[in-house]
Image (cartoon, rainbow, N blue to C red):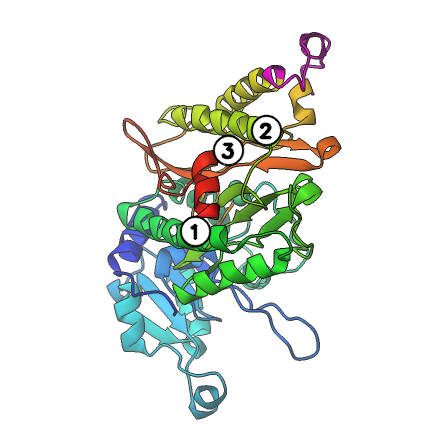
């Protein structure tokens, strides 16, 4: 665990919130993520399963969490199963959680080794009617491999075909969007690390540096501060900014170009998601600045609309209305383009073709209850952009914003975004 210890209170309360949603005589079973293979005997760095982490704080592979609020014996109502270590594992892989450490980390009192799982599973299944199992129900997920949870679902349904199986994801989608104060602190920490790395990069960027060298500056600061990249960074100079999911980060930065940086740190698995667009040579051209100011005004207008009760689809419409006004002002759109537009494909989409923002949390594109109004405790990104392939550049800006009972707090308010301030910092 690279990050500072987190109080088990966060995970105890998260489990309490889940228990409140479970019907009588139910059991929820969650698995840690697999460590994905590369080639030969190689593996990728594993990433904790977000739901598993949310309910336990555990980042160790192979672990299983069982929550059975009505189990006959109180000690069986929450059980964490862990891989038991031995001298061989300690020699080759290093330390694994002891039972005592796991109790302290999670607040769960009953910790068992994995070999006890089959018997406990049978016992608890015999005491339960409904079984809540986990799956990835993110609307845009495109998963081609069978996850550990998916394998588990297949096997348990075969072994116990007559139980009632339910979607844990539905409950997790209700719980996770509303961040507790402790979670907001972790997201703020991720934003702070992102800010520090961006300030470092502002001093580093100059004509001739390669995009990958800039990525390395971010990596240095993120890892130094016990974080990691929350997602594959986009370091896109010149026309690269018009490729929305550009990740090759391999081009030299040229004087006169702008550089789009869509980069965020994760701290304790909580993500920041920032975009800034800066002039490679330390000074925007008049045209670049004109487009930049338009995007900044749209971002600010959209931030102001984040409050409890706002429907995400209405917020997107607001963003599109604000953007349309700016595009008319920039003469990228003419009134006649709007008059003749297909309402399902408004003209502004030529320049701003993605969503204005998304929930943020343990996942960068965090889970949410689709179609529900925003609530206090949600954290949303706000990320308008104008993409101009014909002019060889694109501008996007992105801040992370907490929705509160009476409005919103911009968690990235201290990351420079004014064009003049960016220029001053680059030329300092
Ligand atoms: N970095 C991914 C996004 O902005 O949504
Ligand atoms: Mn982003
Ligand atoms: Mn984003």
The residue to which callout 3 is attached is 370
Q: Nearer the viewer, residue 312 or 262?
A: 262
Q: Position of residue 402 (x, y in %)?
A: 36, 37
Specify whether tag 1 is near ligand 2 (CB below 8 Å).
no
Look at the image and say whether residue 344 sits in the magenta stretch.
yes
Of marks 2 and 1, which one's residue comes earlier in the chain? 1
The residue to which callout 1 is attached is 199
- Separation of residues labelled 2 and 1 (CA atoms): 24 Å
Instruction: Indicate which disc residue 409 carries.
Output: none
Q: How many marks?
A: 3
Q: Position of residue 407 (x, y in %)?
A: 32, 27
Q: Which residues are magenta?
A: 328-346
Residue 412 visible, this orientation: yes
Q: Position of residue 272 (x, y in %)?
A: 44, 48
Relative to 153, say whether 402 is above or below.
above
- Nearer the observer: mark 2 or 1; the answer is 2
The N terminus, quarter of image: bottom left
The residue to which callout 2 is attached is 286
As helix, strand or loop, the secondary structure at mark 2 comes to: helix
As helix, strand or loop, the secondary structure at mark 3 comes to: loop
Q: Residues within 10 Å of mark 2 (few under 14, many from 20)?
A: few
């Amino acid at each position: 665990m690279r990050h500072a210890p987190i109080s088990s209170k966060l995970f105890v309360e998260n489990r309490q919130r889940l228990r409140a949603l479970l019907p009588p005589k139910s059991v929820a079973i969650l698995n840690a993520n697999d460590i994905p293979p590369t080639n030969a005997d190689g593996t990728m760095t594993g990433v904790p399963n977000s739901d598993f982490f949310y309910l336990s704080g555990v980042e160790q592979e192979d672990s299983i969490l069982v929550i059975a609020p009505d189990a006959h014996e109180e000690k069986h109502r929450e059980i964490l199963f862990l891989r038991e270590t031995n001298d061989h594992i300690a020699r080759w892989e290093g330390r694994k959680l002891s039972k005592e450490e796991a109790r302290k980390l999670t607040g769960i009192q009953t910790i068992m080794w994995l070999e006890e799982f089959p018997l406990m599973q049978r016992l608890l299944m015999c005491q339960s009617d409904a079984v809540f199992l986990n799956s990835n129900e993110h609307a845009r997920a495109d998963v081609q491999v069978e996850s550990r949870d998916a394998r588990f679902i297949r096997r348990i349904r075969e072994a116990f075909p007559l139980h009632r199986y339910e979607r844990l994801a539905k409950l997790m989608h209700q719980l996770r969007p509303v961040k507790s104060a402790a979670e907001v602190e972790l997201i703020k920490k991720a934003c702070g690390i992102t800010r520090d790395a961006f300030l470092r990069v502002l001093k580093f960027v100059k004509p001739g540096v390669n995009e990958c060298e800039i990525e390395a500056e971010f990596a240095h600061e993120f890892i130094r501060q016990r974080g990691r990249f929350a997602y594959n960074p986009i370091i896109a100079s010149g026309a690269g900014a018009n490729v929305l999911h550009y990740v090759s980060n391999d081009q030299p930065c040229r004087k006169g170009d702008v550089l789009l940086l869509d980069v965020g740190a994760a701290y304790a698995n909580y993500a920041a998601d920032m975009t800034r667009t800066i002039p490679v040579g330390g000074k925007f051209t008049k045209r670049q600045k004109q487009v930049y100011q338009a995007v900044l005004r749209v971002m600010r207008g959209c931030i102001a609309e984040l409050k409890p009760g706002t429907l995400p689809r209405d917020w997107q419409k607001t963003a599109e209305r604000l953007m349309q006004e700016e595009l008319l002002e920039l003469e990228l759109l003419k009134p006649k383009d709007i008059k003749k537009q297909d309402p399902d494909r408004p003209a502004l989409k030529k320049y701003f073709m993605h969503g204005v923002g998304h929930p943020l949390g343990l996942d960068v594109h965090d889970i949410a209850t689709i179609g529900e109004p925003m609530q206090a405790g949600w954290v949303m990104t706000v990320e308008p952009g104008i993409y101009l392939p014909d002019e060889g550049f694109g501008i996007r800006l992105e801040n992370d914003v907490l929705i509160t009972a009476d409005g919103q707090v911009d968690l990235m308010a201290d990351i420079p975004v004014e064009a003049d301030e960016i220029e001053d910092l680059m030329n300092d």
